[in-house]
Image (tube, rainbow, N blue to C red):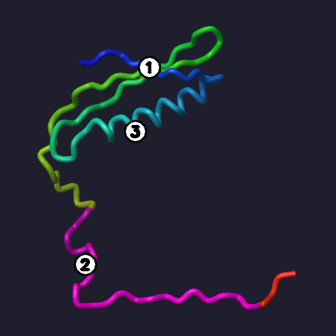
Amino acid sequence: MEEWSTLERDFPTKEKALKAAGIIQITESRLSSNPNGVQFDIETEIFEMDGRWRIKFRKVFAGYSTGCGSCSSCKESNLVHKKDNQPGKLIEFKRNKQKLT
């Protein structure tokens, strides 16, 4: 387990600190985890210090991901593949020639 890191910013209310802690938890876990390798969870705590709220967090090992766990969220038949021999469609931008006054 790693040591706790404290966020340098203070928050005026507990609600704002909880919202920021949730954002930290999601962002840090995405940055720390590898798609097909080591996975980490992020633990967060908020505490009050001198009338302001602070956040501390740490990275906790969760396990290894071996790749697709067949959750059925991305079936191969549902994916749309563009054929290489078909050109893209050009959508022209039409300007409004009427003057704005």
Place residue 88 in its image quadrant: bottom left
Place of residue 81 in the rendered image (x, y in percent of width and height, measured from the top left): 25, 78
Residue at (87% x, 81% y) in the render: 101
Mark closest to the chain's N terminus, 2 or 3: 3
Place residue 15 in its image quadrant: top right
Amino acid carrying label 1: it is Lys
**Secondary structure category for the residue under label 1:** strand
Q: Which dot marks residue 39?
A: none
Q: Residues within 10 Å of mark 1 (few under 14, many from 20)?
A: some
Magenta residues, start to end? 74-97
Do the residues under discs 2 and 3 have CB atoms within 8 angstroms?
no
Q: Which dot marks residue 56?
A: 1
Place residue 33 in its image quadrant: top left
CA distance separating discs 1 and 2: 44 Å
- Find disc 2 in the rendering and name its residue: 81
CA distance separating discs 3 and 1: 14 Å
Residue at (66% x, 88% y) in the render: 95
**Secondary structure category for the residue under label 3:** helix
In this picture, residue 66 sits left or right of residue 74? left
Amino acid carrying label 3: it is Thr
Magenta highlight on residue 84: yes
Mark closest to the chain's N terminus, 3 or 1: 3
- Find disc 3 in the rendering and name its residue: 27
- Identify the image quadrant of the N terminus: top left
Amino acid carrying label 2: it is His
- Residue 67 vs residue 96, the one in the foreground: 96
